[in-house]
Image (spheres, rainbow, N blue to C red):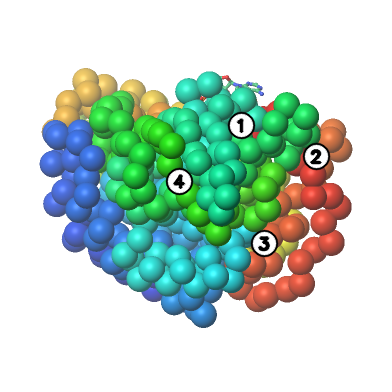
Amino acid sequence: MLFETDDHQRLRQQVRDFAEGEVTPHVARLESSAAVDTILPTLIAEQGWIGVTIPREYGGMAAGHLAKTIIIEELSRVSGAAGAIAQASQLGVAKILHFGTEQQKQQWLPRIAAGTCLPTIATTEAGSGGHVLGMQATAQRDGDHYILNGSKKFVGNSHVGHVHGVIVRTGGADTRPSKSLSAFLVEADRPGIRLVEHQPAMGLHGFSFGDIEFNDVAVPAANRLGNEGDGLHVAYSSSVLYGRPNLTAVSLGIHQAALDSTVAFVKERRRYGAPLADLPTIQHKVGLMHHRLITARQTAYHAVHLLDRGDPCDGKLMSSKYGNVEAAMDSVRTAMEVHAAAGLRTDRPLERYYRDAACIYAPAGTGDIQLLRLAETALGDDRGQWSERLAHLTALAPQAPHSATSTATREHAA
Ligand SMILES: Cc1cc2nc3c(=O)[nH]c(=O)nc-3n(C[C@H](O)[C@H](O)[C@H](O)COP(=O)(O)OP(=O)(O)OC[C@H]3O[C@@H](n4cnc5c(N)ncnc54)[C@H](O)[C@@H]3O)c2cc1C
Protein backbone atom coordinates (compact mmCIF):
# COMPACT_ATOMS: atom_id res chain seq x y z
CA MET A 1 0.00 0.00 0.00
CA LEU A 2 1.01 3.62 -0.59
CA PHE A 3 4.15 4.68 1.35
CA GLU A 4 4.26 1.37 3.28
CA THR A 5 7.54 -0.48 3.66
CA ASP A 6 7.93 -4.18 4.42
CA ASP A 7 8.39 -3.21 8.08
CA HIS A 8 5.08 -1.35 8.02
CA GLN A 9 3.35 -4.36 6.52
CA ARG A 10 4.77 -6.69 9.16
CA LEU A 11 3.64 -4.27 11.87
CA ARG A 12 0.15 -4.09 10.33
CA GLN A 13 -0.15 -7.88 10.40
CA GLN A 14 1.11 -8.00 14.00
CA VAL A 15 -1.41 -5.36 15.16
CA ARG A 16 -4.22 -6.96 13.15
CA ASP A 17 -3.54 -10.34 14.76
CA PHE A 18 -3.50 -8.71 18.19
CA ALA A 19 -6.68 -6.72 17.54
CA GLU A 20 -8.61 -9.69 16.21
CA GLY A 21 -7.30 -12.11 18.83
CA GLU A 22 -6.94 -9.98 21.97
CA VAL A 23 -9.27 -7.01 21.52
CA THR A 24 -12.30 -8.62 19.87
CA PRO A 25 -13.18 -10.71 22.97
CA HIS A 26 -13.55 -7.50 25.01
CA VAL A 27 -15.80 -5.53 22.64
CA ALA A 28 -19.18 -6.87 23.81
CA ARG A 29 -18.23 -6.26 27.45
CA LEU A 30 -17.15 -2.67 26.72
CA GLU A 31 -20.38 -1.98 24.86
CA SER A 32 -22.68 -3.38 27.51
CA SER A 33 -20.94 -1.88 30.55
CA ALA A 34 -19.96 1.53 29.07
CA ALA A 35 -17.61 1.84 32.08
CA VAL A 36 -13.95 2.85 31.99
CA ASP A 37 -11.93 -0.11 30.83
CA THR A 38 -8.60 -0.75 32.53
CA ILE A 39 -7.75 -4.04 30.79
CA LEU A 40 -7.27 -2.85 27.19
CA PRO A 41 -5.04 0.13 28.07
CA THR A 42 -2.66 -2.24 29.86
CA LEU A 43 -2.79 -4.86 27.10
CA ILE A 44 -2.09 -2.26 24.40
CA ALA A 45 0.66 -0.49 26.36
CA GLU A 46 2.38 -3.82 27.02
CA GLN A 47 2.92 -4.23 23.27
CA GLY A 48 5.25 -1.21 23.38
CA TRP A 49 3.06 0.66 20.89
CA ILE A 50 2.65 3.81 22.97
CA GLY A 51 6.36 4.28 22.33
CA VAL A 52 6.11 3.94 18.55
CA THR A 53 7.60 7.42 17.92
CA ILE A 54 9.92 7.42 20.94
CA PRO A 55 13.61 7.24 19.94
CA ARG A 56 15.49 4.02 20.61
CA GLU A 57 17.80 5.68 23.11
CA TYR A 58 14.76 5.93 25.43
CA GLY A 59 13.59 2.38 24.71
CA GLY A 60 11.05 3.30 22.04
CA MET A 61 10.32 1.76 18.64
CA ALA A 62 11.53 4.83 16.71
CA ALA A 63 9.19 3.67 13.93
CA GLY A 64 7.58 7.02 13.12
CA HIS A 65 4.16 8.43 12.35
CA LEU A 66 3.06 6.13 9.53
CA ALA A 67 3.73 3.18 11.84
CA LYS A 68 1.67 4.97 14.51
CA THR A 69 -1.14 5.48 12.01
CA ILE A 70 -1.09 1.77 11.14
CA ILE A 71 -1.23 0.76 14.83
CA ILE A 72 -4.18 3.06 15.58
CA GLU A 73 -5.99 2.20 12.35
CA GLU A 74 -5.77 -1.56 12.88
CA LEU A 75 -6.91 -1.32 16.52
CA SER A 76 -9.78 0.98 15.50
CA ARG A 77 -10.89 -1.41 12.77
CA VAL A 78 -11.81 -3.83 15.57
CA SER A 79 -12.65 -1.32 18.30
CA GLY A 80 -12.77 2.47 18.05
CA ALA A 81 -12.25 2.58 21.82
CA ALA A 82 -9.03 0.53 21.57
CA GLY A 83 -7.73 2.87 18.87
CA ALA A 84 -8.71 5.89 20.95
CA ILE A 85 -6.93 4.50 24.02
CA ALA A 86 -3.72 3.99 22.01
CA GLN A 87 -3.84 7.38 20.29
CA ALA A 88 -4.57 9.36 23.47
CA SER A 89 -1.35 8.25 25.14
CA GLN A 90 0.70 8.35 21.93
CA LEU A 91 -0.50 11.97 21.83
CA GLY A 92 0.64 12.39 25.44
CA VAL A 93 4.19 11.52 24.32
CA ALA A 94 4.41 14.52 21.96
CA LYS A 95 4.87 17.23 24.56
CA ILE A 96 7.74 15.38 26.23
CA LEU A 97 9.52 14.74 22.94
CA HIS A 98 8.97 18.31 21.75
CA PHE A 99 9.55 20.30 24.93
CA GLY A 100 10.97 17.98 27.61
CA THR A 101 14.40 18.48 29.13
CA GLU A 102 16.86 15.61 28.87
CA GLN A 103 16.08 14.78 32.50
CA GLN A 104 12.31 14.71 31.84
CA LYS A 105 12.86 12.49 28.79
CA GLN A 106 15.05 10.11 30.81
CA GLN A 107 12.44 10.04 33.59
CA TRP A 108 9.31 9.39 31.52
CA LEU A 109 10.00 8.06 28.03
CA PRO A 110 11.50 4.67 28.99
CA ARG A 111 8.50 3.92 31.23
CA ILE A 112 6.05 4.96 28.52
CA ALA A 113 7.89 2.87 25.93
CA ALA A 114 7.88 -0.11 28.28
CA GLY A 115 4.12 0.23 28.72
CA THR A 116 4.15 0.94 32.45
CA CYS A 117 3.13 4.60 32.15
CA LEU A 118 0.28 6.12 30.15
CA PRO A 119 0.64 9.86 29.55
CA THR A 120 -2.25 12.20 28.69
CA ILE A 121 -2.66 15.79 27.59
CA ALA A 122 -5.19 17.94 29.42
CA THR A 123 -6.01 21.20 27.64
CA THR A 124 -9.79 21.42 27.25
CA GLU A 125 -12.01 23.07 29.86
CA ALA A 126 -15.73 23.69 30.15
CA GLY A 127 -15.22 27.25 28.88
CA SER A 128 -12.45 26.58 26.36
CA GLY A 129 -12.37 23.93 23.67
CA GLY A 130 -11.24 25.29 20.32
CA HIS A 131 -10.58 28.60 22.09
CA VAL A 132 -7.55 27.41 24.07
CA LEU A 133 -6.73 30.87 25.39
CA GLY A 134 -10.11 31.00 27.10
CA MET A 135 -8.90 28.55 29.73
CA GLN A 136 -9.21 29.42 33.42
CA ALA A 137 -7.10 26.81 35.25
CA THR A 138 -4.06 28.39 36.86
CA ALA A 139 -0.64 27.63 38.27
CA GLN A 140 0.84 30.01 40.84
CA ARG A 141 4.56 29.90 41.56
CA ASP A 142 5.31 29.09 45.21
CA GLY A 143 9.06 28.71 45.81
CA ASP A 144 10.31 25.67 43.94
CA HIS A 145 6.74 24.50 43.25
CA TYR A 146 3.67 25.64 41.35
CA ILE A 147 0.18 25.30 42.83
CA LEU A 148 -2.39 24.16 40.23
CA ASN A 149 -6.11 24.86 40.44
CA GLY A 150 -8.91 24.30 37.96
CA SER A 151 -10.74 21.62 35.96
CA LYS A 152 -10.00 19.88 32.68
CA LYS A 153 -12.62 18.19 30.52
CA PHE A 154 -12.68 15.39 27.93
CA VAL A 155 -9.10 14.31 28.71
CA GLY A 156 -8.25 11.21 26.69
CA ASN A 157 -7.30 8.32 29.04
CA SER A 158 -8.24 10.58 31.97
CA HIS A 159 -9.09 7.67 34.27
CA VAL A 160 -6.21 5.37 33.36
CA GLY A 161 -3.39 7.88 32.78
CA HIS A 162 -0.36 7.94 35.06
CA VAL A 163 1.02 11.38 34.16
CA HIS A 164 -1.07 14.24 32.86
CA GLY A 165 0.35 16.98 30.64
CA VAL A 166 -1.65 19.89 31.99
CA ILE A 167 -1.86 23.30 30.28
CA VAL A 168 -2.74 26.13 32.65
CA ARG A 169 -2.64 29.89 32.91
CA THR A 170 0.51 31.34 34.51
CA GLY A 171 0.46 34.83 33.04
CA GLY A 172 -1.29 37.84 34.51
CA ALA A 173 -3.45 40.49 32.84
CA ASP A 174 -0.36 42.25 31.47
CA THR A 175 1.08 39.10 29.81
CA ARG A 176 0.90 38.74 26.02
CA PRO A 177 -1.92 36.19 25.43
CA SER A 178 0.33 33.79 23.49
CA LYS A 179 2.73 33.67 26.46
CA SER A 180 0.07 33.41 29.17
CA LEU A 181 -0.02 29.60 29.42
CA SER A 182 2.44 27.00 30.71
CA ALA A 183 2.57 23.22 30.64
CA PHE A 184 3.34 20.79 33.46
CA LEU A 185 3.85 17.09 33.88
CA VAL A 186 1.56 16.16 36.77
CA GLU A 187 1.68 12.67 38.24
CA ALA A 188 -1.87 11.29 38.57
CA ASP A 189 -1.39 10.40 42.26
CA ARG A 190 -0.47 13.91 43.44
CA PRO A 191 -2.63 15.07 46.38
CA GLY A 192 -5.46 17.37 45.27
CA ILE A 193 -6.22 15.59 42.00
CA ARG A 194 -9.76 14.28 41.67
CA LEU A 195 -11.13 12.19 38.81
CA VAL A 196 -14.74 13.16 38.22
CA GLU A 197 -17.04 10.15 38.03
CA HIS A 198 -16.98 8.68 34.52
CA GLN A 199 -19.88 9.82 32.35
CA PRO A 200 -20.71 7.38 29.56
CA ALA A 201 -20.74 8.91 26.10
CA MET A 202 -22.48 8.10 22.84
CA GLY A 203 -19.58 6.02 21.56
CA LEU A 204 -16.03 4.76 22.18
CA HIS A 205 -17.34 2.78 25.14
CA GLY A 206 -14.57 1.77 27.51
CA PHE A 207 -12.36 4.75 26.58
CA SER A 208 -12.25 7.39 29.29
CA PHE A 209 -12.31 10.93 27.98
CA GLY A 210 -13.36 12.44 31.23
CA ASP A 211 -12.87 15.27 33.63
CA ILE A 212 -10.07 15.95 36.13
CA GLU A 213 -10.11 18.49 38.94
CA PHE A 214 -6.98 20.08 40.40
CA ASN A 215 -7.37 21.53 43.89
CA ASP A 216 -4.18 23.14 45.24
CA VAL A 217 -2.02 20.51 43.56
CA ALA A 218 1.65 21.19 44.34
CA VAL A 219 3.87 20.42 41.35
CA PRO A 220 7.69 20.83 41.38
CA ALA A 221 8.95 23.57 39.08
CA ALA A 222 11.18 20.86 37.58
CA ASN A 223 7.98 19.33 36.11
CA ARG A 224 7.35 22.37 33.91
CA LEU A 225 7.63 21.60 30.20
CA GLY A 226 9.60 24.27 28.38
CA ASN A 227 9.71 27.79 29.69
CA GLU A 228 6.98 29.62 31.53
CA GLY A 229 4.76 30.90 28.71
CA ASP A 230 5.34 27.91 26.38
CA GLY A 231 1.98 26.28 27.20
CA LEU A 232 0.20 27.37 24.04
CA HIS A 233 3.06 26.03 21.95
CA VAL A 234 2.94 22.71 23.82
CA ALA A 235 -0.82 22.44 23.25
CA TYR A 236 -0.78 23.42 19.57
CA SER A 237 2.26 21.40 18.54
CA SER A 238 0.90 18.26 20.23
CA SER A 239 -2.47 18.76 18.61
CA VAL A 240 -1.17 19.46 15.10
CA LEU A 241 1.65 16.91 14.87
CA TYR A 242 0.11 14.07 16.91
CA GLY A 243 -3.57 14.79 17.68
CA ARG A 244 -4.67 15.42 14.09
CA PRO A 245 -3.00 12.34 12.54
CA ASN A 246 -3.98 10.16 15.50
CA LEU A 247 -7.68 10.94 15.24
CA THR A 248 -7.40 10.62 11.45
CA ALA A 249 -6.17 7.06 12.03
CA VAL A 250 -9.06 6.21 14.37
CA SER A 251 -11.46 7.50 11.75
CA LEU A 252 -9.73 5.43 9.07
CA GLY A 253 -10.03 2.20 11.06
CA ILE A 254 -13.74 2.75 11.71
CA HIS A 255 -14.25 3.62 8.02
CA GLN A 256 -12.55 0.38 6.91
CA ALA A 257 -14.66 -1.62 9.36
CA ALA A 258 -17.87 -0.02 8.05
CA LEU A 259 -16.96 -0.91 4.46
CA ASP A 260 -15.94 -4.48 5.40
CA SER A 261 -19.17 -5.15 7.25
CA THR A 262 -21.25 -3.60 4.47
CA VAL A 263 -19.57 -5.74 1.81
CA ALA A 264 -20.22 -8.86 3.90
CA PHE A 265 -23.84 -7.80 4.44
CA VAL A 266 -24.68 -7.16 0.78
CA LYS A 267 -23.21 -10.52 -0.22
CA GLU A 268 -25.10 -12.43 2.47
CA ARG A 269 -28.45 -10.60 2.37
CA ARG A 270 -30.84 -11.81 -0.34
CA ARG A 271 -33.62 -9.78 -1.94
CA TYR A 272 -35.58 -10.53 -5.12
CA GLY A 273 -33.96 -13.99 -5.14
CA ALA A 274 -30.39 -12.68 -5.37
CA PRO A 275 -27.76 -11.04 -3.14
CA LEU A 276 -28.38 -7.40 -2.33
CA ALA A 277 -25.02 -6.72 -4.01
CA ASP A 278 -26.68 -7.32 -7.39
CA LEU A 279 -28.81 -4.17 -7.10
CA PRO A 280 -27.27 -1.21 -9.01
CA THR A 281 -28.18 1.30 -6.26
CA ILE A 282 -26.44 -0.87 -3.67
CA GLN A 283 -23.37 -1.18 -5.92
CA HIS A 284 -23.34 2.60 -6.27
CA LYS A 285 -23.36 3.04 -2.47
CA VAL A 286 -20.63 0.44 -1.92
CA GLY A 287 -18.57 2.04 -4.69
CA LEU A 288 -18.99 5.45 -3.08
CA MET A 289 -17.84 4.12 0.31
CA HIS A 290 -14.84 2.48 -1.32
CA HIS A 291 -13.93 5.68 -3.15
CA ARG A 292 -14.15 7.70 0.07
CA LEU A 293 -11.99 5.20 1.93
CA ILE A 294 -9.27 5.10 -0.76
CA THR A 295 -9.10 8.89 -0.90
CA ALA A 296 -9.16 9.24 2.89
CA ARG A 297 -6.36 6.69 3.34
CA GLN A 298 -4.18 8.33 0.68
CA THR A 299 -4.40 11.74 2.33
CA ALA A 300 -3.79 10.24 5.78
CA TYR A 301 -0.73 8.22 4.74
CA HIS A 302 0.71 11.00 2.61
CA ALA A 303 0.55 13.49 5.48
CA VAL A 304 2.28 11.21 8.01
CA HIS A 305 4.79 10.08 5.36
CA LEU A 306 5.83 13.74 5.05
CA LEU A 307 6.02 13.97 8.84
CA ASP A 308 8.29 10.91 8.89
CA ARG A 309 10.52 12.65 6.32
CA GLY A 310 10.66 15.76 8.49
CA ASP A 311 9.00 17.80 5.74
CA PRO A 312 6.61 20.73 6.33
CA CYS A 313 3.08 19.27 6.36
CA ASP A 314 0.82 21.05 8.89
CA GLY A 315 -1.78 21.82 6.20
CA LYS A 316 -1.83 18.22 5.00
CA LEU A 317 -2.25 16.91 8.56
CA MET A 318 -5.24 19.22 9.09
CA SER A 319 -6.73 18.52 5.70
CA SER A 320 -6.50 14.76 6.23
CA LYS A 321 -8.14 15.03 9.68
CA TYR A 322 -10.96 17.07 8.18
CA GLY A 323 -11.36 14.86 5.12
CA ASN A 324 -11.12 11.56 6.98
CA VAL A 325 -13.70 12.48 9.60
CA GLU A 326 -16.15 13.81 7.02
CA ALA A 327 -15.64 10.79 4.75
CA ALA A 328 -16.02 8.28 7.58
CA MET A 329 -19.20 9.95 8.85
CA ASP A 330 -20.61 10.00 5.31
CA SER A 331 -19.72 6.33 4.86
CA VAL A 332 -21.24 5.10 8.13
CA ARG A 333 -24.43 6.88 7.12
CA THR A 334 -24.33 5.23 3.69
CA ALA A 335 -23.67 1.88 5.39
CA MET A 336 -26.70 2.43 7.62
CA GLU A 337 -28.86 3.07 4.55
CA VAL A 338 -27.62 -0.14 2.94
CA HIS A 339 -28.33 -2.15 6.11
CA ALA A 340 -31.71 -0.43 6.68
CA ALA A 341 -33.39 -1.83 9.81
CA ALA A 342 -30.71 -4.49 10.31
CA GLY A 343 -28.11 -1.76 10.94
CA LEU A 344 -29.92 -0.51 14.00
CA ARG A 345 -29.67 -3.70 16.04
CA THR A 346 -26.78 -4.26 18.43
CA ASP A 347 -26.20 -7.82 17.17
CA ARG A 348 -24.33 -6.17 14.26
CA PRO A 349 -21.40 -3.77 14.76
CA LEU A 350 -22.64 -1.06 12.40
CA GLU A 351 -24.50 1.02 14.97
CA ARG A 352 -21.28 1.03 17.06
CA TYR A 353 -19.26 2.26 14.08
CA TYR A 354 -21.87 4.98 13.55
CA ARG A 355 -21.67 6.13 17.16
CA ASP A 356 -17.85 5.85 17.33
CA ALA A 357 -17.33 7.78 14.08
CA ALA A 358 -19.31 10.71 15.48
CA CYS A 359 -16.94 10.90 18.47
CA ILE A 360 -13.96 11.75 16.24
CA TYR A 361 -15.32 15.08 15.00
CA ALA A 362 -14.37 17.21 18.03
CA PRO A 363 -10.96 16.03 19.30
CA ALA A 364 -7.78 17.71 17.98
CA GLY A 365 -9.96 20.41 16.46
CA THR A 366 -13.46 20.30 15.04
CA GLY A 367 -14.02 20.50 11.29
CA ASP A 368 -14.54 24.26 11.64
CA ILE A 369 -11.15 24.66 13.28
CA GLN A 370 -9.38 22.60 10.58
CA LEU A 371 -10.98 24.76 7.87
CA LEU A 372 -10.10 27.94 9.73
CA ARG A 373 -6.45 26.88 9.89
CA LEU A 374 -6.46 25.78 6.25
CA ALA A 375 -7.92 29.13 5.24
CA GLU A 376 -5.12 30.90 7.13
CA THR A 377 -2.57 28.81 5.25
CA ALA A 378 -4.21 29.59 1.89
CA LEU A 379 -4.48 33.27 2.70
CA GLY A 380 -0.88 33.47 3.89
CA ASP A 381 -2.00 34.32 7.41
CA ASP A 382 -0.39 31.36 9.18
CA ARG A 383 2.63 32.04 11.35
CA GLY A 384 4.92 29.13 10.64
CA GLN A 385 4.46 25.39 10.72
CA TRP A 386 4.94 23.09 13.69
CA SER A 387 6.29 20.43 11.36
CA GLU A 388 9.02 22.85 10.26
CA ARG A 389 10.07 23.37 13.85
CA LEU A 390 9.65 19.93 15.38
CA ALA A 391 9.25 17.13 12.83
CA HIS A 392 13.02 16.50 12.79
CA LEU A 393 12.69 15.12 16.34
CA THR A 394 10.73 12.08 15.12
CA ALA A 395 11.80 11.95 11.45
CA LEU A 396 12.94 8.51 10.33
CA ALA A 397 15.95 9.91 8.51
CA PRO A 398 16.94 12.65 10.96
CA GLN A 399 17.47 16.01 9.34
CA ALA A 400 18.40 19.43 10.60
CA PRO A 401 15.37 21.43 11.69
CA HIS A 402 13.88 23.50 8.90
CA SER A 403 14.48 27.19 9.37
CA ALA A 404 11.17 28.11 10.91
CA THR A 405 9.67 31.24 9.46
CA SER A 406 8.35 32.20 12.87
CA THR A 407 7.96 30.76 16.33
CA ALA A 408 4.75 32.66 16.93
CA THR A 409 1.40 30.85 17.01
CA ARG A 410 -2.18 31.84 16.57
CA GLU A 411 -3.57 33.47 19.60
CA HIS A 412 -7.25 32.75 19.32
CA ALA A 413 -8.04 29.17 18.48
CA ALA A 414 -6.49 25.67 18.56
C1 LIG B 1 -13.12 11.48 22.01
C2 LIG B 1 -12.55 12.77 22.50
C3 LIG B 1 -11.23 12.81 22.98
C4 LIG B 1 -10.71 14.00 23.46
N1 LIG B 1 -9.43 14.01 23.96
C5 LIG B 1 -8.94 15.14 24.53
C6 LIG B 1 -7.66 15.14 25.18
O1 LIG B 1 -6.96 14.11 25.21
N2 LIG B 1 -7.25 16.28 25.78
C7 LIG B 1 -8.00 17.43 25.75
O2 LIG B 1 -7.56 18.43 26.31
N3 LIG B 1 -9.21 17.47 25.13
C8 LIG B 1 -9.69 16.36 24.52
N4 LIG B 1 -10.92 16.38 23.90
C9 LIG B 1 -11.66 17.63 23.82
C10 LIG B 1 -11.56 18.24 22.41
O3 LIG B 1 -10.25 18.72 22.20
C11 LIG B 1 -12.60 19.36 22.32
O4 LIG B 1 -13.87 18.72 22.27
C12 LIG B 1 -12.38 20.22 21.08
O5 LIG B 1 -11.25 21.05 21.26
C13 LIG B 1 -13.59 21.11 20.80
O6 LIG B 1 -13.94 21.80 21.95
P1 LIG B 1 -15.48 21.82 22.42
O7 LIG B 1 -16.02 20.44 22.34
O8 LIG B 1 -15.52 22.53 23.72
O9 LIG B 1 -16.22 22.68 21.31
P2 LIG B 1 -16.16 24.26 21.14
O10 LIG B 1 -14.76 24.72 20.94
O11 LIG B 1 -16.97 24.90 22.21
O12 LIG B 1 -16.92 24.43 19.77
C14 LIG B 1 -18.36 24.48 19.68
C15 LIG B 1 -18.71 24.76 18.23
O13 LIG B 1 -18.15 26.03 17.82
C16 LIG B 1 -17.31 25.86 16.69
N5 LIG B 1 -16.15 26.75 16.83
C17 LIG B 1 -15.35 26.90 17.92
N6 LIG B 1 -14.40 27.80 17.68
C18 LIG B 1 -14.59 28.23 16.40
C19 LIG B 1 -13.93 29.19 15.56
N7 LIG B 1 -12.86 29.87 15.98
N8 LIG B 1 -14.41 29.37 14.31
C20 LIG B 1 -15.49 28.68 13.86
N9 LIG B 1 -16.15 27.78 14.62
C21 LIG B 1 -15.72 27.57 15.86
C22 LIG B 1 -16.88 24.39 16.74
O14 LIG B 1 -16.50 23.92 15.46
C23 LIG B 1 -18.13 23.73 17.25
O15 LIG B 1 -19.04 23.54 16.20
C24 LIG B 1 -11.48 15.19 23.42
C25 LIG B 1 -12.79 15.15 22.93
C26 LIG B 1 -13.32 13.97 22.47
C27 LIG B 1 -14.73 13.94 21.95
Q: Amino acid at mark 3?
A: Ala
Identified at 39% across, 26% down, the residue is 333
| Residue 365: x %, y % from top left | 57, 34
| Residue toward you, 55 or 187 | 187
| Residue 159: x %, y % from top left | 30, 43
- Which of the two labelled residues, at mark 2 and mark 4, occupies the earlier sequence position? 4
| Residue 336: x %, y % from top left | 32, 26
Identified at 17% across, 26% down, the residue is 345
Using a 10 Å C-alpha cutoff, classify the residue at mark 4 as few (fewer than 14 neighbours), some (14 to 19) or many (20 or more). many
User: Which residue reaches farthest front?
Assistant: 143
Identified at 24% across, 60% down, the residue is 43
Q: Would you name the residue on which mark 2 appears?
A: 382
Q: Amino acid at mark 1?
A: Val
Asked where in the image residue 28 lies, by quadrant, the reply is: top left
Give how far apart the Cα atoms at labels 1 and 4 are.
Answer: 23 Å
Q: Would you name the residue on which mark 3 appears?
A: 391
- Which of the two labelled residues, at mark 3 and mark 4, occupies the earlier sequence position? 4
Q: Is mark 4 within 8 Å of ligand 1?
A: no
Q: Is residue 188 above or below residue 133?
A: below
- Which of the two labelled residues, at mark 2 and mark 3, occupies the earlier sequence position? 2
Give how far apart the Cα atoms at labels 2 and 3 are.
Answer: 18 Å
Nearer the camera: disc 3 or disc 1:
1
Q: Would you name the residue on which mark 1 appears?
A: 132
Nearer the camera: disc 1 or disc 4:
4
Q: Is residue 293 above or below residue 279?
A: below
Of helix, strand and loop, which one carries label 4?
A: strand
Nearer the camera: disc 2 or disc 1:
1
Q: Amino acid at mark 4?
A: Ala
Give how far apart the Cα atoms at labels 3 and 4 are.
Answer: 33 Å
Of helix, strand and loop, which one carries label 1?
A: helix
Whether the residues at callouts 3 and 1 have beta carbons within 8 Å, the answer is: no
Whether the residues at callouts 3 and 4 have beta carbons within 8 Å, the answer is: no
